[in-house]
Image (spheres, rainbow, N blue to C red):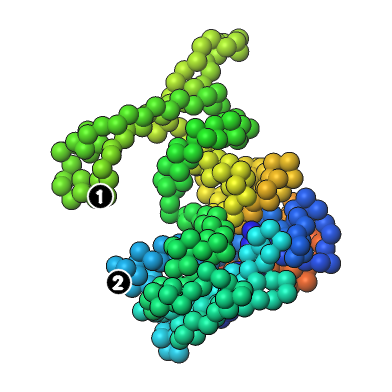
Amino acid sequence: MIKNFIFQNFLSFKEETVFTMERQKNDASHKESFFKTSEGDLLRSAIVYGANASGKSNFSKALVFFQRFVTEGLKLSLANSPIQTVPFLLDVNTQSMPSCFEVELLIGEIRYVYGFEVTQDRVHREWLHQYPNKKVLFDRNGTIETSQRNLKEATSDLKEKTRSNVLFLTVLASYNGEVSNKIVDEIKKITVFPADQKDLMLEYSFQVYPRYKDKIDRMIFESDVGIKAFKIAQKEVTKDEFVPPVFPEQVREFLTAGKNKFVHRQVSTVHTMYDSKGTEVKDVEFDFFAQESEGTKRIFGLAGIIAEALDKGNVLMIDELSASLHPFLCRYILKLFNSKKENPKNAQLIFTTHDVSLLDSEILRRDQIWFSEKDRYGSSKLFSLAEIGERKDLNYGKRYFEGRYGALPYINSLEGIDQL
C-alpha cells in the first residue's frame, strides 16, 4: 500500500509534488475511509479534480512511468532503448535535468522508501531505505554503496552487472533477491488505467471474469443496467479468421503483432422480456458489443479491475473514472473501497474526475479531495483540500464552482456573460 508518492520534473510537473494517502490527524470524520497501520492511518481512497490539461492525467502517467521502469526497465536496458521519461520542457533549466520519483510503501510492519533520479540515457541516483529504525539498504550516486549487513542480496557481482540505464532494484529482483522482490511485487500491485484505455480495461475484465464472476456479476446487477446474466464463450481461430485478408496488410500486421494465438470472443447479455401486464415471458440475449450502451461496457470494464484490486489489496488508479458513469455509480465504487467488509485487504483507490457531485462532506474527508492546477508558466501543482484549511461542514462543490479552490478552467469568451 502507498503512503506517499513524490515526483518532480516530469511532464507538466516542474516542482516537487507530494501526493499522500496519510490521514490528516486532526480530522476523525468518516472513520470507514481510513485504516490503521504501524506507520499511522492511511486513506482507502482519494479523488483528483482539475480543469482539462491541468495535470490530472500527467499525475497518473507519473505513476505509470515509475511502475513500468521498475518492473520492465531491464528489458529496455538490454534493448538499449531510451528511458521513457519526459522532463518539464517549458523551462530552459529543467530540460536537461533528471526527473525524480520516490514512493513510500508499507509492506507488513515495514516502511520502505525507494526512489530514483533519471534522464533518458541513464540513472543518476537511486536509493532504498527501511523504517522504523532507519536502515540505508543501498544508495547509488555514480557508484552503488550497500551494506551487506542490511541487504545481503546486494552482492559486488550484481553491482558490476548493473548498467547505467537500469535500476539496481530491478537487477536485484531479477536475481530473486528476497527484499527487492518483495518491494517490486508491491510496486507491481500499483495498477493504473489511463483515460484513453477503455478497451484495455474491458479486455482485462474479460480475462479475470472467470475468477471473479460472482463479484463482477453482483456489481453489474447492483448497477441496475437490466442485465440478468453474462454468457462468454471464446474459441481459438486462425490468423485469417481473426483479421480477414480483406483488411489492408498494414492493419493486419498491427492487430496481430506479437501474437501466436488468436481468439474470438463472443459475449452476450441476458435480459428479461415482459408482457403488457408486467409478467416475465422469457430471457432475451443481446450482443454485448453491438447492443449494450457505452455506459454498460464501462461498468463491466471497471468491475473486473475493481474486483481484483479488492481481492489482492492493490493500489488502483483510474483516470477519468466518471466517464460514461452515473454519479451514483461513482459513489457506489467509493463505498466499496471505503467498506471494511468489502475491502478487508485495504486496497486503495485513486481516481481523477470532473464529477463535482462527489465534492460532498457527507461522502469525503478533506484529505481525500485533491486538485490539480496549472500556472501561467505551464507548470502543474497538486494540492489537497486539507492543505487549504477548509472547514468540514461546508458545501465543497459550491465553493469549488465559486473558484475558492482554484483548479477551474478560465474561459475568456464567457467573461461578463451574466450581464447579457
Viewed as shown, does residue 300 lie left or right of 406?
left
- Whether residue 178 is visible here, answered yes or no, is yes
Q: Where residue 38 sits in the image (x, y, percent)?
A: 76, 62
The residue that label 2 is drawn on is 80
Q: Nearer the viewer, residue 324 or 164?
A: 164
Label 1 secondary element: loop
User: Of residues 238 and 128, which is closer to you in this image?
Assistant: 128
Q: Amino acid at mark 2?
A: Asn
Q: Residue 360 location, x and y as percent?
A: 73, 54
Q: Is residue 215 left or right of residue 230?
A: right
- Residue at 58% from the left image edge and 78% from the top image edge: 147
The image shows a total of numbered marks equal to 2
Residue, disc 1: 257
Q: Nearer the viewer, mark 2 or mark 1?
A: 2
In primary-sequence order, the first of circles 2 and 1 is 2
Q: Nearer the viewer, residue 350 or 169?
A: 169
Q: Quadrant of the N terminus?
A: bottom right
At 55% from the left edge and 40% from the top edge, which residue is drawn?
303
Where is residue 111 shown, x and y percent of the image? 67, 67
Task: Between residue 180 and residue 11, name the one nearer to us.
Answer: 180
* Number of other residues with Cα within 10 Å of mark 2, as a class: few under 14, some 14 to 19, many 20 or more: few
Give left or right: position of 114 versus 82.
right
Residue 146's place in the image compared with 350, above or below, is below
For the residue marked with disc 1, what is the amino acid? Ala
